[in-house]
Amino acid sequence: MKIRTSLPIVFTVPTMVVLAILAFVPTIDAINIALQNRELSNPDSVYVGFANFRALVDDPRFLNSVWVSIEWEILTVVATMAVAVPLAVLLFEATSPNVRNALCVLFIVPALLPRVSAAFVWRFAFHPLFGLAVYPLRLITGHPVDLLADPHTAMLAVAIVDVWQWGLLFSVVIVKLLETLPPQPLEAARLDHARTWEVYAYVALPMLRGALISLVFVKMIESLRAFDLIYVMTRGGPGITTETLDMYAFSQGFIESGRISYASSMAVLMMIATTVAFTVLWRRVRRWQEV
Amino acid sequence: MLVAASVVIPILWTLLSGFKNRVDIVTPTPMLFFTPTLDNFLYVLERDSVRAGLINSIIVSGCSVLIGAALGLPLAYAVARYPMRFANDIQFFVLSLRFLPPVAIAIPLIVIWLDVDLYDTRIALIVTYSLLTLATTIWLAIPAFKRVPNEIEEAAFVDGYGPYSIFFLIALPIAWKSLMGAIVFSFVLVWNEFLIALMLTTSDAKTLPVVASEMTQLGRDVPWGILNASVILLSLPPLLFLGVLSSFLSSALKPRNQG
């Protein structure tokens, strides 16, 4: 359509202005607060330069939370894909279309649950005395097992819930993608006596490479938002073994000390780190997909 | 099958426990048969905090979704249909909003809303959530508008429709099904949102997830039946949209031959 019209401007400018205000005001203010020594209980504050950032470097709890966040990120992204891809292949290979569609709808359910609910459902299932999920463990060992209170298993237990939500959702997405593939290459591979797993590993999944990479990307972003799960299930505990960055920033700025400036300096670091990391990754993803 | 069981059983168990008396929950061996009771649900629904949370949740998610749709859909349409110099930059900007860690937005917003005396109000939450709904709606609506066949719009143009009436009378109705999916998705996102609500409210404007999570932190002598009931209440609205969202997912992943 080659017509001169005001539509693009009228439709774009107001929304962009609103978006820009909503996005930049908090971001800039976060930096502003991070350079002060403001506390929640006391609105008076002075600028202290980079003191908050210097304090962070020497804060072992901060370093711990960075490490926990990285661990969490890797664990959940890998586990989600490790569950989603084989499950999708299994669904695609071994079920009739009707069963598959029914299962697909079912597998979306966990992702739709509010994370608070999902976290609670599982906290209940993990309850040492009457939880259903640990009932077998209780029978075998003869005494209550509290996965969420054990420093070795707490993160794993929370990660199970994350994968329960995202891994299943992604398997549905991958099934739908497999359904869109042209059947000829797969049949050709079968005629060449490729084994079933080879058909998928060498033909079908490489055809979906671009989409799979995007899924990993989405999951990486979503894994940064695990606060709700961790908050309801462990509150960062036992000790600080599951205390991610956002959990620590929250407790510094809010419950424990109300040091809002200190928390804000963490927030600023997180913003910078994620924006840089994801901008670089996004460019990469775009390139891989175009190849 | 095993996986299907892993989905159904924990949810079903929570559902069942919502109808159980306390004695039947606190048993060393899981109990499948029990005398059901509605007490838990009645108790939950009669709590003022739950009612207030429910009302807040409905108002806050409703308004922010409406704002997201009213401002987001036109932008998405303009990006999808009109060749613009900044189209790619706009898309990337909208996407980059999703990178921002929610804590990073919430902490400065606490201070901002405190300073303008709007802390712990629904307005503050609605404005904050609008960022979320806008970004989501735009991101999902761009492909939905692109799937509307160009020929139809051109035919409408030949018939004498102006660009605005093409948007309102042709593109919107045709893309409506996918757009509904995008809007519902942004609703579920905001309804389920917890961290920002937790940090931006203390009493008056608490949304349902915050209320429910407080109930889950009641300490050792937990009224599990009541908890289960409140969690079920919280989860119902998103699940109502299961059908809409699963068909949205299917259509969004269909190959785009007309591209």
Image: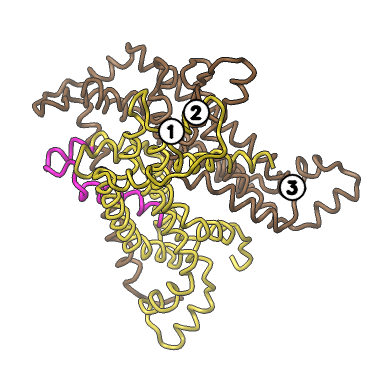
Residue at which label 1 appears: A229
Q: Which residues are magenta?
A: B109-137
What amino acid is at disc 2? Val
The chain containing the residue under callout 1 comes to A
Query: Tag on residue A158?
Result: 2
Query: Mark 3 or 1 closer to N-term?
Result: 3
Answer whether residue A132 is magenta in the image: no
Name which quarter of the figure residue A237 lies in. top left
Q: Position of residue A152 (x, y in %)?
A: 52, 15
Q: Position of residue A47 (x, y in %)?
A: 14, 24
> Which class describes the residues within 10 Å of circle 3: few (<14), some (14-19), or many (20+)?
many
Chain B: drawing colour: yellow
Question: Within 10 angstroms of label 1, few (less than 14), some, or many (20 or more) residues?
Answer: many
Q: Are marks 2 and 1 in contact (CB under 8 Å)?
A: yes
Most extreme residue toward the bottom is B159
- In primary-sequence order, the first of circles 2 and 3 is 2
* Residue closest to the eye, B135 or A259: A259
The answer to whether tags 2 and 1 share a subunit is yes
CA separation, marks 2 and 3? 32 Å
